[in-house]
Amino acid sequence: MMAKAQPVRGTHDLLPDAFGAHAEVIATARRVSATYGYREMATPIFEFTDVFARSMGETSDVVSKEMYSFDDRGGESITLRPEYTAAICRAFISNGLQQSVPFRAFGAGPMFRYERPQKGRQRQFHQIDVEIIGAPEPAADVEVIAVGTEILNTLDVLHKTVLNLNTLGDPESRDAYRAALVSYFSDHRDKLSKDSQDRLGRNPLRILDSKDEGDRKLVADAPLFGDYLNQQSQDFFGSVLFGLDTLSIAYEINPRLVRGLDYYTHTAFEFVTDALGAQGAVIAGGRYDGLIEQLGGPATPGIGWAGGIERLAMLSGVTAAAPQPIALIPIGEAAETEALKIGQALRREGFIVDQAFRGNLGKRMKRADKAGAVAALIFGDDELAKGLVQVRNLATGEQTEVTLPQITTAMASFSGSRV
RNA sequence: GCGGGUGUAGCUCAGUCGGUUAGAGCGCCAGAUUGUGGCUCUGGAGGUCGCCGGUUCAAUCCCGGUCACUCGCCCCA
């Protein structure tokens, strides 16, 4: 079973470089969303299975075949969260946050779905997430999309993406359209692909997005959503578009953009890229006005999105800044002891200090170089007898003598080494 | 869940038309250089050829299965 020390399929270790890239994506999203008044929060990594089953829809792929669910020792059905939105809505209800709407939340963390791994698709993956709950106004849709746009822009990937936009209308419009679609496709059921025949029962809107050529011909003559949108839904969508235009946020209206999860209403959107292969959505979300009520809370509208951290990191190529430590190079026992004190003083000033535990001067210099050190403090008996250390600038090779009490101030020119 | 490709050293890859000790570059360790790094030179360590089974006198190579990665479908972030 565990022949080698192998990670579980679809999971990956985040070694320091990759972790740094992730952290950079999260830090960017945190900073940008904070400027819009979103505050970071976290929910547990697992919830009662019901939280997801009831919100996302029993027939959705995620719920029906992709959840990591298990009975805990108390016999409760527990599920590792496959997405953030339902969990945040549950928290909204649990904590009585209807007192403080609109509630703006930012979150980041791991999600779990039992899917076939691919580039940009893992079983444990990480998302950033932005939600605004208790705002029925289309301005909230505009805001949430603007947050996403700014984050992509800050990561310098906005130009690699296209914002696809659609409306699913209010429940009345959506139900009417769904009925019309089912009726239309049922009449041509035998011409539908096998996948789409399946979708007809589970999620007929998905047929619109089919890649099958036969399906596409049928879709071309299918009823149009626009004909089933009531006035209210049309006005709502119009306001969203007006807001985006005002902010010069470019979008493409994509009538085939539908969401796989039951709780979406009105605005649905996706920032997609063609640079990542088949998994092109980097940020996707929409409005979910019925979700909180469905979870047993007071009828409260909401809108938000999730972004894939791995995908964003890949697309942006962000990297963590490499640390630039100061290397301590003591020579001799007395110097080793002195190094402890010098290191402590420098660290308390915020410097990154690197010290080898062994090796002669040459070895330690090599190590310092490999560690990316910007400076080396070299001191042996000779220096310490005079109360001095050698400060070597490893970029220029320039070396000066500094007295012990002056070390931290003398290192000020190496501020790049500070955390 | 379905179909295709790949799997040889820490990394990137070569190779064996089935045959004795499986190679390179980079990286790592050591020495040249016992108080001064990067460059150079010399030497060294490191491999169950993904795993299990089959065919064969003989398998890293052929066959089957399996695991992982990867590309597409599906789904989605």
Image (cartoon, rainbow, N blue to C red):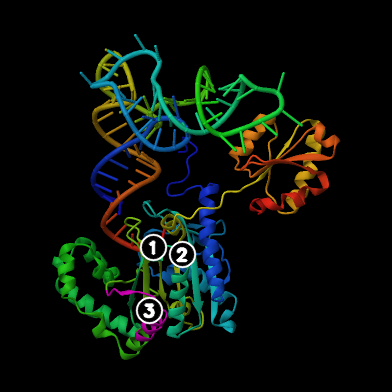
Chain letter for the residue marked with disc 3 in the picture: A
Foreground tag (3 vs 1): 3
Left or right relative to A379: residue A149: left
Disc number at residue A62? 1
- Mark 3–mark 2 Cα distance, whole angstroms, equals 18 Å
Q: Residue B38 at x, y = what percent?
A: 56, 34
Query: In which quadrant of the rendered view does residue A386 lie?
Result: top right
Disc number at residue A265? 3
Chain letter for the residue marked with disc 2 in the picture: A
Per the image, the residue denoted by label 2 is A83
Chain letter for the residue marked with disc 1 in the picture: A
Query: In which quadrant of the rendered view does residue A374 lie?
Result: top right
In front here: A146 or A88?
A: A146
In the image, which residues are magenta? A238-255
Three-letter code for the amino acid on which mark 3 is drawn: Thr
Disc 3 is placed on an element classified as strand
